Image (cartoon, coloured by chain):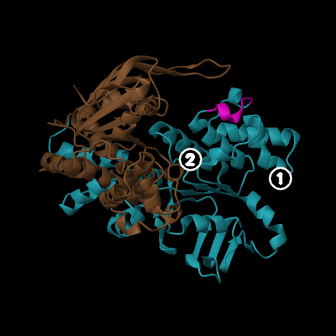
């Protein structure tokens, strides 16, 4: 594996030199390997959105460096635009950013700005639509006629069409119902698997993060509180709660059982996993068929 | 008679030039008693928000009736009385705060109702204390966290002194601790002030706290009952692609393998106790 993103002592202060000065990110250093699926969690105001915005140069760090594929993204400030094609960013409630006449044109907008045209552009758009599970007949509709979940996916398709090396999704499932959440999440997992690029997913829904992330960045008060693999992070549930975060209910249940002396592993993250751990134990007691 | 009495309500949205959305609410009857805490769950588009907007005459039924404390919502003269009795809180706190200072925002409702200034002062203080935001009374709303903003929005409703508060996904845009703040505020209002609460939510861990859960699907009520009754129907809920608490899903799958249970556990503690008993 090779390193795609490296953050070195990264920091950011809002309104520096004014009476409203406020530190949002404080001395964050980490490296992300190519092809990883990273979860990002943290309390509101923990600095995670500010951190994400520094990854593609939307805001310029007040300290430290963002190194993308071996190169400081601010080395040549005039070329910062090209960084934004490499690190694609999907903001919260991206459906508010749809504006074109048709879904197709909306998805194509970013890719077109990159210089894609003709067949190449068409391929990028149809592929992005497929990754986000938008049916071909929707593409000629106005984006404003889509359902909430479809609009959300159309907005994400617009970023995917640019084929970014790193895709950052800031709370992509917020406000969706359980089914919409499920569809979006499994599409993102499929996209990641097929494209093998790097995905950063910011979310408050721990159940979602637990299901999909290889490693998790935990932010607290602007600092990097943890950066470990998913099991390890959720194993430290007491610590997470101190940061104002919650672990999935199923993880807590299994942890309580472990504390009561039952032979169950640490860091159980999904109902499937708990089920397969418990079945043999219950069978031994003669409680199952 | 119940505080809220909904009888066979049907409602369709008119859409220009296109087929109307057929019956967003399609024959719903529901009674809500004073002091009840009701959770309404269901997919986007199942009609739950549309139904909520019928509770304070924001929408009027195409057919059927909605009667709030004896007043029919379709009679225009009743509109203001009804809106004083039933307050509505929406999903996005940023869309419902109007003033630049917290206490002025909370005062907006009673000011519009022509309440005496000294009485407004009393109500604002009381409402802000009820949602635990009194110490922020002189802050600017836009500088608060999501959970704090949403509690200010709730205080704004409380200052009107309604008997019922209807919340349409009030926690959808909040982080876990913000969600916790809002939900404990609602529980406190319900238990201490006997406020009637109708909570529309996608979060099953919030729904299990209610006295009664109403599940909507395609404009109709699919099932309703106590959280125990509703969430033990894991199969039915899954079939309609609705979530159940993880504890209930686990228990349900284990019963499928032969485990016998008295009831389906909805909370972490119940689930641990159930598994402990089964494995000892």
Q: Position of residue A87 (x, y in %)?
A: 70, 60
Specify the farthest residue to the bottom.
A17
Tell me if I can see residue A132 in this picture: no
Q: Position of residue A120 (x, y in %)?
A: 83, 42
Name the image quarter holding residue A253. Answer: bottom left
Task: Please indicate whether residue A122 sits to the left or right of residue B95 in the image.
Answer: right
Specify the subunit that label 1 lies on: A
User: What element does badge 1 sit on?
Assistant: loop
- The residue lying toward the viewer, choosing from B82 and B195, is B82
| Chain B painted colour | brown
Which disc, if any, is residue A189?
2
Taking the magenta stretch, the answer to whether it contains residue A157 is no
Task: Please indicate whether residue B31 sits to the left or right of residue A69 in the image.
Answer: left
Compared to residue B99, the image places residue B277 above or below, namely above
Q: Position of residue A136 (x, y in %)?
A: 70, 29
- The residue lying toward the viewer, choosing from A68 and A34, is A68
Chain appearing in cyan on the rendered image = A
Q: What is the magenta range? A: A140-146
Q: Which residue is mark 1?
A: A114
In the picture, the quarter occupied by the N terminus of chain A is bottom right
């Amino acid at each position: 594996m090779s390193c795609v993103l490296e953050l070195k002592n990264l920091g950011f202060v809002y309104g520096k030199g004014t009476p409203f000065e406020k530190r949002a990110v404080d001395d964050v250093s980490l490296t992300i390997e190519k092809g990883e699926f990273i979860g990002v969690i943290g309390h509101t105001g923990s600095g995670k959105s500010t951190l994400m915005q520094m990854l593609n140069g939307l805001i310029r760090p007040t300290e430290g460096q963002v190194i993308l594929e071996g190169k400081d993204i601010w080395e040549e400030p005039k070329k910062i635009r090209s960084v934004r094609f490499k690190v694609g960013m999907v903001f919260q409630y991206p459906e508010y950013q749809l504006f074109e006449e048709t879904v197709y044109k909306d998805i194509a907008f970013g890719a077109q700005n990159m210089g894609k045209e003709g067949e190449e552009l068409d391929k990028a758009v149809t592929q992005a639509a497929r990754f986000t599970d938008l049916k071909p007949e929707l593409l000629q509709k106005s984006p404003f006629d889509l359902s909430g979940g479809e609009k959300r996916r159309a907005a994400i398709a617009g970023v995917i069409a640019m084929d970014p090396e790193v895709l950052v999704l800031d709370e992509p499932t917020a406000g969706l119902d359980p089914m919409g959440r499920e569809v979006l999440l499994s599409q993102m997992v499929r996209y990641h698997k097929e494209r093998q690029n790097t995905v950063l997913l910011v979310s408050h829904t721990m159940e979602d993060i637990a299901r999909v992330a290889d490693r998790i960045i935990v932010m607290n008060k602007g600092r990097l509180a943890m950066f470990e693999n998913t099991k390890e992070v959720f194993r430290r549930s007491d610590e997470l709660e101190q940061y104002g975060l919650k672990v999935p209910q199923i993880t807590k249940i299994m942890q309580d059982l472990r504390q009561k002396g039952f032979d169950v592993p640490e860091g159980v993250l999904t109902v499937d996993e708990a089920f397969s751990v418990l079945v043999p134990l219950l069978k031994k007691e003669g409680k199952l068929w | 008679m119940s505080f809220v009495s909904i009888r066979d309500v049907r409602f369709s949205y008119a859409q220009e030039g296109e087929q109307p959305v057929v019956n967003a609410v399609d024959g719903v009857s529901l009674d809500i008693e004073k002091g009840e805490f009701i959770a309404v769950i269901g997919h986007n588009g199942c009609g739950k928000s549309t139904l909520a907007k019928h509770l304070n005459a924001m929408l009027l039924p195409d057919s059927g009736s909605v009667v709030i404390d004896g007043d029919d919502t379709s009679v225009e003269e009743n509109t203001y009385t009804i809106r004083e009795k039933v307050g509505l809180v929406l999903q996005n706190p940023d869309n419902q705060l109007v003033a630049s200072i917290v206490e002025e925002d909370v005062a907006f409702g009673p000011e519009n109702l022509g309440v005496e200034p000294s009485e407004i002062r009393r109500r604002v203080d009381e409402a802000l204390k009820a949602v635990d935001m009194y110490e922020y009374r002189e802050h600017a709303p836009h500088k608060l966290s999501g959970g704090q903003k949403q509690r200010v929005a709730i205080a704004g409703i409380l200052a009107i002194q309604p008997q019922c508060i209807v919340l349409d996904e009030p926690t959808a845009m909040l982080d876990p601790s913000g969600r916790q703040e809002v939900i404990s505020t609602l529980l406190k209002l319900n238990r201490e002030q006997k406020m009637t609460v109708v909570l529309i939510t996608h979060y099953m861990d919030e729904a299990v706290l209610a006295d009664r859960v109403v599940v909507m699907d395609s404009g109709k009520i699919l099932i309703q009952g106590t959280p125990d009754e509703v969430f033990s129907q894991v199969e039915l809920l899954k079939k309609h692609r609705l979530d159940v608490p993880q504890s209930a899903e686990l228990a349900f799958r284990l019963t499928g393998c032969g485990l016998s249970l008295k009831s389906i556990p909805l909370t972490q503690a119940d689930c641990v106790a159930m598994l402990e008993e089964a494995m000892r």
